[in-house]
Each structure stands twice: as C-alpha cells, then as structure tokens.
Amino acid sequence: NRTGVNTGEVVANDDSTADQKLATGDAVNVAARLEQAAPENQIYIGDVTFRLVSDAVEATPVEPLELKGKAERVRAYRIASVNGTDGNLRRVDTPIVGRESELAVLKTIHRDVCASHEAHLVTVIGDAGVGKSRFVHEVVERIAVGARVLRGRCLPYGDGITYWPLVGMVAQASDIRERDSHEEAYKKMLGVVGRVDVAERLASATGLSTASFPLGEINWAARKFFEIMTADSPLAAVIEDIHWAENAFLDLIEHVRDAAADAPILLLATARHELLEQRPD
C-alpha cells in the first residue's frame, strides 16, 4: 500500500446521480505521482500539504522527485508520525484589540455561574479566522481565573466522531494517553469520576467499550462528569467548532446547560455562522 497526498484546486463532479465520480487537475495528478513514488506502506505529501499540516506531523524531506508532466523536480516529504488532529497551532500570543464589551459580557456571565452554581452556555460565532479561538483564550486566561479548564473540538469528518469533544475532555481530565489500552484508560477514568454507572456510559460514548446505551443515558453520564469536575473549582468547558457537531452532541450540550445541578459550569463554544442555519434555536 502506498499513499500520496497533495493540496490544490481541482475540478470535480458533484452530481450524486452520475455514474462516474470525477476529480481532475494538477493537484490530483501530482498526488497520483506521489503515490507511485512512495515506498511500500509509506505516505508522501506535497510541499503545500506539508506547510498546512506541519504542526501536526513529523515528516522528513525526500530527494526532490522527478515526476511525469512536471518540468522541475517536485519537493515532497515522508510522513513519519501524526501527533494530533490540528494541522496548525493557533497563535494566542498576540494582543487582543477591540473586544472589551464582549469580554465584559463574559465576565458578568462567569460571575453569575460562580454565584448561582448553574451551567451557562455561551457560543462565540464568527467567520473562519476572525479570532474566535483567540477570544476564548483571553476569556480563560483573564476571566475564568482559577477555573478548571477542559477542551474539546468537533471534527468535520471521520468515524466515531459524534462525541469527539467529550473524548478529548475525558482524556484530559483522566490523564489518558494514546498508548494506554482501553482497560488502562477505563481504569483511569473510573478513578476520576468515582462511579461505575457514569464510567460505563462514558466508556461507551468515548469508544472505550462496545456497550450500547440510549442517548438519554449518555447525556446523563456526560452531565454527571461535568458536575464531578466542579468538585473543587468552577469548570470552563471549551468546545471548538460546534458548527461541525452532530445533533446528538448538540443535544448533550443543551442537556448539560439545562439540567446541571449545583455545579458552576461555563460552556464556552465557538462556531461559524453555519450553526445558525443548522440550529436556529
């Protein structure tokens, strides 16, 4: 098996009724050549692809390739390992400008969360690149001081991603590592939540077991997990890119918001405007 990955503009047929699916263009041709050039069980990626994912992979440059149809040799890299799902590290070291009114709103909400011991949901909505993550970082650093912070991210595609943000939060809270077996991960999680009924349902949602539970029970277990996380301090649960979330996970967030009891929880989500089209309420 050999794999080639390249990035660029393509012409594609998006007609779902077509007998043949088509994607063509220079990016596709180079990807095919990279595939052919890669050794067995190796992945070659193009230069643009490498620049896009360099923060998430370990890759080594290979000798520039002489590819059919290209006048000059093409730079390529061999993937050694993948370190995460985020291709680019987001800059948070630049000063934030012109968000004082929004920060004041979040300060008031966080004060209410701590005073009432209730859950509040705030969604920061904006176009890609407008600075949503930078704003959330400022909220966590400047306003949610002393709070326990758990982070999760929704993914645009993949298998088993319905509760992917919850996977990240449970792993962070339980110090679960990629090298841990399912049994080791479950033991760590149980040690943190302290309840078998909660742990069993969280294990089902996060892929640590094959057991199946109704969605309502998954939501209940997630809520109990968040409540347990507030035992010693308020909780700031940061969930990024919920415009990609499946409805089941959006229901989970709303359940935590509406049903959490005696638990100071700030649910801080980021989304693009598409979320309002999917979930206008």
Image (tube, rainbow, N blue to C red):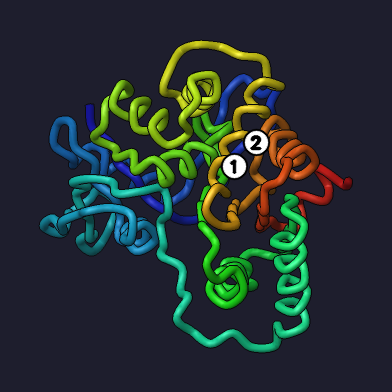
Front one among 118 and 33: 118
Q: Is residue 138 above or below residue 223?
A: below
Label 2 SS: helix
> Residue at point 77% right, 64% down?
112
Q: Can residue 15 be seen here?
A: yes
Residue 98: name its quadrant: bottom right
Query: Which labelled disc corresponds to residue 204?
Result: none
Badge 2 density bin: few <14, some 14–19, many ≥20, Cα 10 Å: many
x, y (%) of residue 267?
67, 53
> Residue at point 41% right, 65% down?
89
Label 1 SS: helix
The kind of residue tagged 1 is Phe
Query: Which labelled disc corresponds to residue 226?
Result: 1
Residue 29: name its quadrant: top left
Q: How many marks?
A: 2
Badge 1 density bin: few <14, some 14–19, many ≥20, Cα 10 Å: many
x, y (%) of residue 32?
32, 40
> Residue at point 76% right, 40% down?
254
Front one among 261 and 207: 261
Front one among 101 and 91: 101
Q: Is residue 163 left or right of residue 273?
A: left
Where does label 2 land, which residue? 223
Badges 1 and 2: C-beta atoms under 8 Å apart?
yes
The kind of residue tagged 2 is Arg
Q: Is residue 143 above or below residue 197?
A: below
